[in-house]
Each structure stands twice: as structure tokens, then as C-alpha cells.
Amino acid sequence: MPSALGWGEAAVLGLLQGLTEFLPVSSSAHLRIVGPLLPSGGDPGAAFTAITQIGTELAVLLYFRHDLVRIALAWLNSLKHLRGPWTPDARMGWLILIGTLPIGLLGLAFKDLIEGSLRNLYLTASMLIGFALLLAWADRRGAHARQLSQLTWRQGLLFGFAQAMALIPGVSRSGGTITAGLLMGFTREAAARYSFLLAIPSVLASGFYQLYRSWGAPQAVAAGPTALATVIAFFVGYAVIVWFLKLVSTRGYMPFVIYRIVLGALVFGLLGFGVLQP
């Protein structure tokens, strides 16, 4: 991340992170696109993105606090009875852990690519458009019938691999998992809720790892502006969760599909005219 990143720029990026983290439009893509357009210029970087995501995940912890406490207590109790039978909450706890494995393993295996060539804007724009079309097809084709109580181990793992696709900017963590959920027949709200819960372990682990790695390093992110961006992302992210869950319970994902296609086309245009560099 450029050392010259100012407080105002950090506030803009924090606002952007909070607005886009939970929507199926890819927050990492937005930070990657807008960063070079700011006065300081340049890619904000994977470290800045991961750290500011701590703010949005804290918003998830606050919003789902009652569910998470219930799931955590049930999961801990299940450790005494590993052969079962488990309560639905205990089972959900295990499914979240299993679903986290793909992104954790792939994130470690391809760390250099994730922080380097996968941040190419041509790839980002392509992913924005490509996954928009996939989301549109899934939303139209899905049965919209299954609830999270019907989630199987196989489906939990498939959700995990879908989430791992978000390691590529432009895919979207929520977009990938929601698309997978719709294709497996889950309701729009169930797919969205599970995408929020599934993201908690991996996003917090990635954010705190980047925070630890950046602490005192020569190329560390700017502490003050990054902290400001993280706080803004928390408050804005919480409001977006409330709004988004209400929206998807009554309407489809087509507005986000259109937005992704327009944004992807705009990025291709800016790249073609030299306004942005890959």
C-alpha cells in the first residue's frame, strides 16, 4: 500500500469496504479499482484489504451475536459426544469449520499469486462480468426452497470451495457462496446468511495475520489511516447487513448482476484508455 495514503483516502476506502463487503459485487475488486484513482495512487494492497475486512467481520459478529453464541456453545458441547447425535447448532458449527478449510488451504498455497498477479485488473474485470452471468443464471435456475437446517456435509464443503474463489478479486466472497447456495436449491436469504457466517473464521484469520505481518515491517500499511478505514467499514458494514438481508428476502439479485457487468465494462474501458494500469 502506498505510504502516502491520507486520512481522507482511507475514509473513502473504508466506506467502500463497508458498502461492498456483504454485497455480491466484490469489495476487494472495488478497493483494487478505486485505489489507483485516488491522489496517492497505486493498489491499496492485499494487506490493507484484509485488515479493513476485520471491521466488516466485527459487524457480522455483532449482528449475529445471539446465533453465534448459541452455535459456539452447542459446538463445544458436541466435543463431548463426537459420535453424535448433534443439535442443529452444533452441526452448523462443524459445517462452518469444514467450509473454512478450502479457503484456508488454498490461501496459504497460493499466497504469492493472491498478493501479486491475481490482482491484475484485466482479470478483475473479467471476474466481475463472468460471475455476474453465473449469479444471474443461479438466481433464475435455483429452486429457492432449502433452509440452512437442511445443509449437508457435502453442501457445506461445496460452499467452502465457492468461498475460496473470492481469493481472486472480482469474484466476491458473498457472491461466490450465494451463487453456490442458489444452485444447490437454498433460498436467497439462507444462502446470504450462511455466506456471512462462513466468512467469519477465514476473514478474521486473514486480517489478523496481515496485521501481525505488517506490524513494524518496512512496507507496513499506514497504521492510523488503516485503523480509520477499519472503523468506518464496521459501522457502514453493519447497516448494509441489515438492509441486504431484508432486500434478498423479497427481491432477486438482478440489480447486482447489472452493476457487476457495468463495472467490469467500465474497468475495461479505463484500462483501454490508459486511465488505469493493469
Image (cartoon, rainbow, N blue to C red):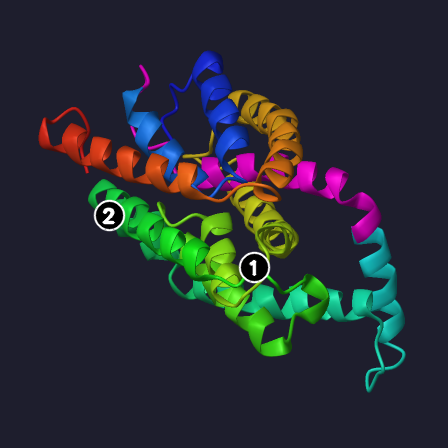
Residue at horizontal 57%, vertical 52%? 188
- Read off the magenta span: 38-67
Which residue sits at x=36%, y=39%? 29
Question: How many labels, in total?
Answer: 2
The reply, left or right, for residue 171 in relation to residue 75 is left
Q: In which quarter of the image is residue 254?
A: top left
Is 64 one of the magenta-colored residues?
yes
- Residue 215 seen anywhere in this rendered image of the structure: no
Amino acid type at circle 2 is: Ser
Percent of width and height locating residue 118? 29, 51
Q: Which of 26 and 80 is in front in this view?
A: 26
- Residue type, mark 1 in image: His
Identify which residue, 110 or 245, lies in the foreground.
245
User: Which label sits on residue 126?
Assistant: 2
Q: In this view, does 200 lie to the left or right of 178?
A: right
Q: Position of residue 93 (x, y in %)?
A: 74, 65
Q: Residues within 10 Å of mark 1 (few under 14, many from 20)?
A: some
Rendered image quadrant of residue 137: bottom left
Secondary structure found at label 1? loop
Task: Identify the residue under disc 1.
Answer: 144
Q: Which of marks 2 and 1 is nearer the N terminus?
A: 2
Relative side of 123 to 3, left or right: left
Relative vertical location of residue 178 with respect to residue 266 in this rendering, above or below: below
Q: Is residue 71 magenta?
A: no
Specify the principal SS of the magenta part.
helix
Q: Position of residue 25 (x, y in %)?
A: 42, 40
